[in-house]
């Protein structure tokens, strides 16, 4: 019985001491253009914080609509994904233009505001 315990303990210790290489370390990142498209896809759609407001009425309600846009009359950069953001709230309203672009090894982000000169 003691030999069985010794063998079991040896196997357990070997498993813990000599962990196998993680499969994540061997995975390659997708091409940067694929990453740009995926980030833009995550960023588009509808959002609101209704559940948060229901549990904490002090938080202002926010509704956000984000959609992919093409620039009229402009020369789009290679691989650039443009997103129009419209955020409405009881506390504020916000309009933004987001551009996701491929950099050397990262996804670049440019944010522009729409300014209403009449306000």
Image (spheres, rainbow, N blue to C red):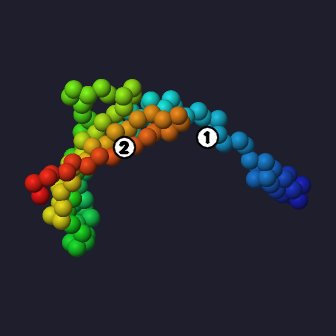
Q: Position of residue 24 (x, y in %)?
A: 61, 40
Nearest the camera: 104 or 29? 104
Nearest the camera: 8 or 71? 71
Which residue in the protein does label 2 denote?
A: 110
How many marks the image carries: the answer is: 2
Instruction: Tell whether 119 sits left or right of 68.
Output: left
Residue 46 seen in this snapshot: no
Q: Position of residue 119 (x, y in %)?
A: 12, 58
- Mark 1–mark 2 Cα distance, whole angstroms, equals 30 Å
Residue farthest to the left? 118
Which residue in the protein does label 1 denote?
A: 24
Q: Residues within 10 Å of mark 2 (few under 14, many from 20)?
A: few
Q: Compared with residue 110, is residue 56 higher up or lower down, i.e. above or below? A: below
Residue at 27 percent across and 43 percent down: it is 97
Tell me the element at label 1.
Answer: helix
Nearest the camera: 93 or 27? 93
Instruction: Tell whether 96 sits left or right of 2.
Output: left
């Amino acid at each position: 019985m003691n030999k069985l315990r010794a063998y079991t303990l040896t196997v357990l210790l070997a498993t813990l001491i000599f962990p196998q290489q993680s499969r994540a370390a061997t995975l390659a990142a997708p091409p940067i253009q694929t990453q740009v498209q995926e980030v833009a896809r995550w960023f588009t759609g509808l959002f609101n914080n209704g559940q948060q407001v229901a549990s904490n009425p002090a938080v202002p309600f926010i509704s956000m609509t984000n959609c992919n846009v093409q620039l009229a009359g402009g020369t789009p950069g290679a691989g650039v994904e443009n997103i129009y953001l419209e955020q409405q709230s009881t506390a504020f309203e916000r309009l933004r233009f987001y551009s996701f672009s491929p950099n050397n090894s990262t996804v670049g982000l440019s944010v522009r505001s729409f300014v209403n000169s009449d306000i």
